[in-house]
């Protein structure tokens, strides 16, 4: 690994054109690590260094897509063409989609016909579908081959394939018949035919399936790669385990941001995104939630008299209302995550609601006890009773709202992850005000 | 896949001892899917079915650890011994740790000496360390072997190894010298020696390294498996990509629950956990946050006079205070996630604080405009000014608190993910009350 001084030395060695010094600095570096350092170089140094690297395409693929596009635009077109030709088909297509409209047709025209065709096909699939993330660099063999013949064929195609470890068996029309692992091939006798070795109970993805579902399958079955087929069951691509990890990370970020009442704009870096994008990401929910708070305000306005008569009630207002919001946010968080990991399903709702009621009664009871002591100290016995009853009701209500909202959103065909903590909090706040002041008005007049 | 009726039929076929009917129902099922169905059977049916399965160990490993332990306690000891002998070393050790104290010594005594030794070693590593999650089922070869000899050796050991695709080259003392992939072996000439083919620039994990760091390395380098070495650089285990996915899921759940002010108790299922565990998970934070709300109460108490004089102020209290909390929760969510994915680092704090201030000014400005219109309608011009100024100040403060808390927690050696939305909300609520009522007291008297 380089330290910051070596990074500076690398930058200088590149700009002053000392290839041996550059070589010494980056020798024996893992492609992923080297990409991490290249990311920190100036654009000029990046553009000069990359065409000179031995495994340029491999290293380049480890760079973030936005950085790839910036460098690509500045590269000598011939260098860019060579780089893109050596990339994997899925990364190549992603880069292609990020290029400027002037560069795209030139690249298409210059690429080898097979690769041009691949890009045109892959780029046509909608974002976040299996087609948009899959790679065309898979290995297919005919079912009639023997193990020995198969190994010979594998040797020939090995260089530019994403994985050799899962080999797909297809007929002449590219229909997927089975899968054989390289592990099986190593273990089998040389004269066995692939058709007698292959697994035919296949798990596969459809080309228009959502990428989240694809990642789930890879993780659930512990697969190295998942074959992707088109409507006619022809093999058109594979998605590998490392892509699945990236998808899971991106989808988790989306869920987490939603739960924080933030719209997720794809590929937005907190560090590099324009201020206005960060603003856009957040303003809608903030303004929307103002209306939630307005409901609390109306609740308060309705009970202005009782507040004026017992100003001590205002003192406890944030505490009671906040506790309902907090308990509700907890419930929603637990529920959304349990849905995301498959721990619970929508059909479990009634059962879960029953359990949640018990938990809420325990939580509410504890909180009611605590707050009634405070109420007795600061007010009187009657205030203590009002506080205890309100707390119990508010926490119970908060928990049930938090638990139910993800299910309701799902019924409305909305993403349950949008049951953000702030949304639940706003709803619970408004209802909490009404519960509290209603109980107070009944008991204190 | 089975439907609920078939599941019921399976349960009955097992309990009424109709092995052919069972076979028909579960034929051609993927081990992961079959495990999913077994999970839904009664314990009695599970205990009867599992010893009869062809790939019992493989299927058993797909069951959740708590279910595995329940079944193991009920199995005939001889069946359990056979099952555990066939499991992978990491899963076997996890199961062993979950067994009752009466069963553990018996299993240890009966297992083959090599496997007994493995369990004793693996079980000794602390939870969440690389040692606790790694597997001992890796393949090692000597550097002097030729490709042809290597393939012969691989054939012999293939059956019980976690992966054949990465082969570790070690010296006589088990020191890790290099790694060769099966892909390289397939491509190389038969007479080449492994030492001339192996990669020697190794990325590895230490046996006492945190599991989160191990998962990060696997994802960062796109590795199939990461070798784990002890202090003397001897190879002691591997962690595979599918383990990394499980770790990432568990660590993400922990972070998400923390951000929802929920303590994460390991392996707690929302569906099956005891009510009291769910209560314990949540009560601490709820009570803790009451004290945060009390601060808001004290703020209000301090300004009781101004509230009594301008009761309209109470109407806007939830709105203003809530907006600060919401904006702060957004900032904290963005920051904690960006830290988790490596988008930002702690050294970027000042830079990020500057950017956040700009975003906060835009957000606060928008909100101020909106709320001042409301204030003018419901109050007068002076109220509108008070509201606009308060909103701007509160949103700015909320954003800066939300952005700073993760950094402060980190400086205090606490987990930044504990900068939960509810905690930020409570802090922002209390300060919001003070800001609002202070501005009001200055301008309205």
Image (cartoon, coloured by chain):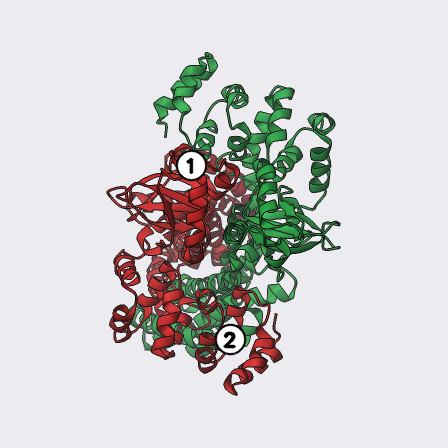
Chain colours: A green, B red
Identify whether B359 is placed above or below A105.
below
- Viewer-nearest residue: A32 or B105: B105
Report whether B338 appears left or right of B297: right
Task: Decide if residue A437 is in sight here.
Answer: no
Identify whether B24 is placed above or below A269.
below
In the rendered image, the residue lying farthest to the front is: A191
Cβ–Cβ under 8 Å for marks 1 and 2 = no
Report whether A283 appears left or right of A174: left
Task: Decide if residue B362 is in sight here.
Answer: yes
Q: Which mark is residue B353?
A: 1
Q: Earlier in the sequence, mark 1 or mark 2?
A: 2
Q: Chain of mark 1?
A: B
Identify whether A345 is placed above or below B220.
below
> Residue B182, image x and y in percent?
48, 43
Neighbor class of circle 2 (other Cα within 10 Å; few <14, some 14-19, many 20+) is some
Quarter in which the N terminus of chain B is drawn:
bottom right
Q: Quadrant of residue B308?
A: bottom left
> Residue A309, image x and y in percent?
42, 69
Q: Which mark is residue B40?
A: 2
Q: Chain of mark 2?
A: B
Check disc 2 and report its element: helix, strand or loop: loop
In the rendered image, the residue lying farthest to the bottom is: B16
Is circle 1 on the same chain as circle 2?
Answer: yes
Which residue is found at the position 64% from the left and 53% from the top? Answer: A210
Check disc 1 and report its element: helix, strand or loop: helix
């Amino acid at each position: 690994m380089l330290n910051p001084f070596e990074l500076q030395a690398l930058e200088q060695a590149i700009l002053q054109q000392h290839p041996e010094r550059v070589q010494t600095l980056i020798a024996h570096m893992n492609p992923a690590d080297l990409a991490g350092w290249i990311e920190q170089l100036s654009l000029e140094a990046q553009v000069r260094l990359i065409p000179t690297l031995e495994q340029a395409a491999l290293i380049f693929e480890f760079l973030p897509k936005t950085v790839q596009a910036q460098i690509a635009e500045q590269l000598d077109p011939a260098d860019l063409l060579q780089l893109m030709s050596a990339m994997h088909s899925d990364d190549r297509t992603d880069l292609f989609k990020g290029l400027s409209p002037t560069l795209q047709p030139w690249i298409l025209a210059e690429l080898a016909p097979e690769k041009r065709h691949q890009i045109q096909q892959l780029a046509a699939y909608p974002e976040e579908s299996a087609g948009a993330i899959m790679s065309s660099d898979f290995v297919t063999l005919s079912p009639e081959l023997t193990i020995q013949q198969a190994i010979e064929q594998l040797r020939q195609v090995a260089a530019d394939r994403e994985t050799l470890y899962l080999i797909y068996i297809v007929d002449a029309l590219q229909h997927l018949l089975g899968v054989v692992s390289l592990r099986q091939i190593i273990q089998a006798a040389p004269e066995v035919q692939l058709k007698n070795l292959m697994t035919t109970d296949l798990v596969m993805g459809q080309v228009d399936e959502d990428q989240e579902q694809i990642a789930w399958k890879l993780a659930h079955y512990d697969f190295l790669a998942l074959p992707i087929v088109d409507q006619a069951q022809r093999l058109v691509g594979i998605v590998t385990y490392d892509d699945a990890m990236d998808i899971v990370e991106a989808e988790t970020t989306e869920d987490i941001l939603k739960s924080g009442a933030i719209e997720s704009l794809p590929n937005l870096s907190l560090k590099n995104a324009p201020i206005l994008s960060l603003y856009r990401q957040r303003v809608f929910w903030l303004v929307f939630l103002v209306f939630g708070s307005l409901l609390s305000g109306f609740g308060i306005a309705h009970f202005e008299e009782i507040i004026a008569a017992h100003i001590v009630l205002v003192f406890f207002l944030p505490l009671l209302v906040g506790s309902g919001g907090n308990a509700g946010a907890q419930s929603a968080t637990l529920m959304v995550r349990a849905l995301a990991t498959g721990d619970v399903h929508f059909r479990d709702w009634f059962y879960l609601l029953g359990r949640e009621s018990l938990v809420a009664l325990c939580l509410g009871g504890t909180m009611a006890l605590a707050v009634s002591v405070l109420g007795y100290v600061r007010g009187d016995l009657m205030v203590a009773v009002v506080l205890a009853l309100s707390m119990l009701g508010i926490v119970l209500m908060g928990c049930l709202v938090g638990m139910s909202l993800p299910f309701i959103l799902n019924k409305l065909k909305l993403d349950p992850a949008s049951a953000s903590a702030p949304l639940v909090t706003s709803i619970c706040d408004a209802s909490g005000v009404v519960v509290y002041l209603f109980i107070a008005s009944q008991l204190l007049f």
